[in-house]
Image: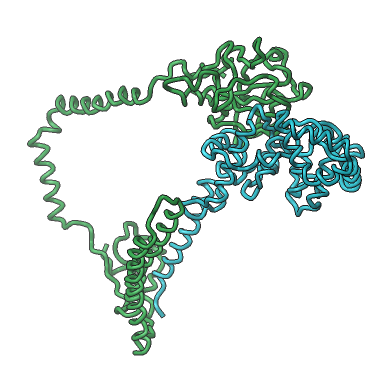
Chain colours: A green, B cyan
């Protein structure tokens, strides 16, 4: 199909009958700078002024570098970067705006249409290409030697398989570390970050303590990993406000309850405790847990209550854990049984 | 501490001297007791005239919600045992008297002057022992700001934001911005747990810990962000969004200018 029959230009793959007619190029509008020398001179001065402003900006940046050095005083960073940035911005924008203004006002603005060149090769070139491919096929025997060809396909299919093994090794196998924390029977509840043990009498009604297991600070390695699993929030409510299930009645001590601080949704620290509503809010996705009812989810995307740490008091009056958490803390994982 | 106690007893026996000393010494003696008994200080030592005056103010301004004897009603909690610190915090920040019930009582223009506030605090403190107004030595903001920063991030930042800019809680409640709060207010909030804020007693955060936290907040307030304007310190999402909108708007403007024909 030749382009001259239709008026929709070149490059169309599909020709339709109801094609929108090409409106063509708008009539040329003569600019003020083409009509009046005064305007032309003014535009010329403006472009020059922008380039000069660029020079001034760059020079100012150099001046600011020396005049406002970064010292030990923290705020000098702010002043220095601000002034350097302003100078360099003016330097770069002056060039850019000047160049564009120059092109728009002073350079020729007559509209020119350039047709796309035809992308299809000539018949001779296409025939020659097919000839070369056929020759290569017959010389290599790719179509003829079926055994070789199929074994090559097999080799290519098997080649990526070792990578699957290697990808499997990218992370350490967590084994059962997701199911256990540092807490065990008799571990004292201690304050974060000092590790001071907490007496039951220290926890007054309305108090909230951020708790780590005793001995966490003595760990030589994996301290943060252990803290991330074992972090606990300790609060005391009026005992009559607590609605405890029968099997959990022995898990609290005189209104003091301890819950994992790791959200069961995606593991953010849930620690926004409201003293009067007894709501515990996760700041990441607004999951809200009700401390009075075993931290059940009352709002948000979390699907399980926060795990409760069974606590008791030792002979010296310090709060201790009765055991580890009875379920894995934190978000769901593949092998976790709900 | 012993001196403070002796002075307080002396004041009770000598009302004439008390009128002079106590007007200025109420804060001091309260703070002294705070040290003496782990900030859950026992009786304050105001004179009877102040308490009577405070009671009058209480009846006129507070009793409609808190009850004639501060025993609490359906609308407001009992004030028996909340202590002078609680009254001082709520009234001197303008949260009390509350304008309307709602998820949270807002800060409003303060309605009572310092002496009226002190009298109401004396009245409420006379009802039952409670946290006293902190002594100036407890809130000197001369502690270790690094340690205070660590304690703040562990105990406070989840609600109040690491930069103290505050943040949202559930159902319309929020943790207020701490920039602009003075050391006394911060200390009182810690020991009394106003509204939904938990209490941080002296076994949890010792008075030295509290002073460190205050030091950290005062440092934050007097040292603006070295990186530039904070945009409210609300975090990377807000700051990123602002930059995206502002910079994208600028880019669109430049693009329009580039495409427009010169006149």
State the residue in front, B180 or A45.
B180
The answer to whether any part of residue A57 appears in the image is: yes
Question: In which image quadrant can residue A278 be found?
Answer: top right
Residue located at (13% from left, 51% from top)? A127
Question: In which image quadrant can residue B34 be found?
Answer: top right
Describe residue A285's horizontal placement relative to residue A60 as left or right: right
User: x, y (%) of residue A227?
Assistant: 51, 24
State the residue in front, B162 or A9.
B162
- Which residue is the extreme one toward the left? A139
The answer to whether any part of residue A276 appears in the image is: no
Q: In this view, does B67 lie above or below A116?
A: above
Q: Is residue A201 above or below residue A57?
A: above
| Number of marks in picture | 0
State the residue in front, A241 or A285.
A241
Question: In which image quadrant can residue A153 be found?
Answer: top left
Residue located at (44% from left, 58% from top)? A79
Residue located at (74% from left, 40% from top)? B28
Q: In this view, does A140 lie above or below B108?
A: above
Q: Is residue B106 above or below residue A147?
A: below
Quarter that holds the N terminus of chain A: bottom left
User: x, y (%) of residue B204?
Assistant: 64, 28
Quarter that holds the C terminus of chain A: top right
State the residue in front, A118 or B196.
B196
User: x, y (%) of residue B6?
Assistant: 79, 32
User: x, y (%) of residue B72?
Assistant: 87, 36
């Amino acid at each position: 199909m030749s382009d001259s029959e239709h008026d929709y230009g070149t490059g169309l793959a599909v020709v339709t009958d109801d094609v929108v007619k090409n409106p063509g190029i708008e009539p040329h509008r003569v600019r003020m700078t083409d009509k009046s020398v005064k305007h032309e001179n003014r535009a010329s001065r403006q472009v020059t002024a922008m380039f000069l402003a660029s020079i001034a900006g760059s020079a100012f940046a150099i001046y600011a570098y020396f005049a406002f050095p970064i010292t030990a005083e923290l705020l000098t960073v702010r002043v220095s970067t601000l002034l350097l940035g302003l100078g360099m911005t003016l330097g770069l924008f002056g060039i850019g705006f000047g160049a564009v203004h120059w092109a728009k006002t002073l350079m020729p603005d007559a509209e020119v249409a350039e047709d796309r060149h035809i992308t299809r090769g000539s018949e001779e070139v296409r025939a020659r290409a097919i000839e070369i491919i056929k020759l290569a096929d017959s010389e290599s025997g790719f179509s003829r030697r079926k055994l070789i060809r199929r074994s090559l396909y097999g080799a290519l299919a098997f080649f990526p398989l070792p990578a699957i093994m290697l990808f499997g090794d990218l992370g350490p196998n967590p084994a059962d570390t997701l199911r256990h924390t540092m807490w065990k029977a008799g571990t004292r509840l201690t304050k974060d970050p000092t590790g001071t043990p907490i007496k039951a009498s220290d926890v007054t009604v309305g108090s909230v303590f951020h708790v780590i297991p005793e001995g966490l600070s003595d760990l030589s390695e994996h301290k943060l990993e252990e803290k991330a699993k074992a972090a606990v929030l300790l609060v005391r409510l009026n005992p009559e406000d607590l609605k405890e299930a029968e099997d959990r009645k022995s898990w609290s001590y005189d209104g003091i309850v301890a819950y994992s601080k790791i959200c069961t949704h995606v593991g953010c620290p849930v620690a926004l405790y409201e003293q009067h509503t007894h709501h515990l809010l996760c700041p990441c996705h607004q999951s809200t847990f009700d401390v009075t009812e075993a931290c059940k989810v009352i709002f948000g995307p979390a699907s399980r209550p926060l795990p409760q740490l069974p606590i008791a008091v030792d002979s010296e009056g310090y709060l201790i854990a009765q055991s580890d958490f009875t379920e894995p803390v934190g978000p769901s994982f593949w092998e976790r049984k709900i | 501490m012993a001196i403070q106690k002796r002075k307080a007893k002396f004041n009770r026996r000598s009302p004439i001297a008390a009128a002079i000393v106590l007007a200025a010494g109420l804060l001091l003696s309260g703070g002294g007791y705070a040290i003496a008994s782990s900030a859950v200080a026992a009786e304050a030592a105001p004179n009877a005239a102040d308490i009577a005056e405070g009671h009058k103010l209480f009846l006129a301004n507070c009793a409609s919600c808190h009850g004639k004897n501060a025993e609490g009603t359906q609308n407001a909690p009992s004030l028996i045992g909340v202590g002078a610190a609680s009254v001082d915090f709520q009234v001197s920040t303008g949260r009390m008297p509350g304008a309307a019930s709602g998820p949270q009582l807002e800060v409003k223009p303060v309605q009572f002057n310092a002496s009226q506030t002190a009298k109401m605090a004396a009245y409420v403190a006379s009802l039952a022992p409670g946290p006293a107004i902190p002594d100036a030595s407890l809130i000197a903001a001369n502690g270790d700001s690094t340690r205070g920063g660590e304690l703040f991030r562990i105990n406070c930042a989840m609600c109040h934001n690491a930069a103290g800019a505050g943040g949202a809680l559930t159902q319309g409640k929020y943790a207020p911005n701490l920039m602009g709060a003075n050391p006394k207010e911060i200390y009182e909030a810690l020991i009394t747990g106003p509204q939904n804020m938990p209490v941080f007693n002296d076994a949890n955060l010792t008075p030295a810990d509290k002073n460190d936290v205050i030091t950290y907040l005062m440092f934050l307030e007097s040292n603006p962000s070295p990186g530039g304007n904070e945009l409210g310190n609300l975090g990377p999402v807000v700051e990123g969004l602002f930059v995206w909108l502002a910079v994208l708007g600028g880019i669109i403007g430049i693009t329009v200018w580039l495409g427009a024909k010169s006149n």
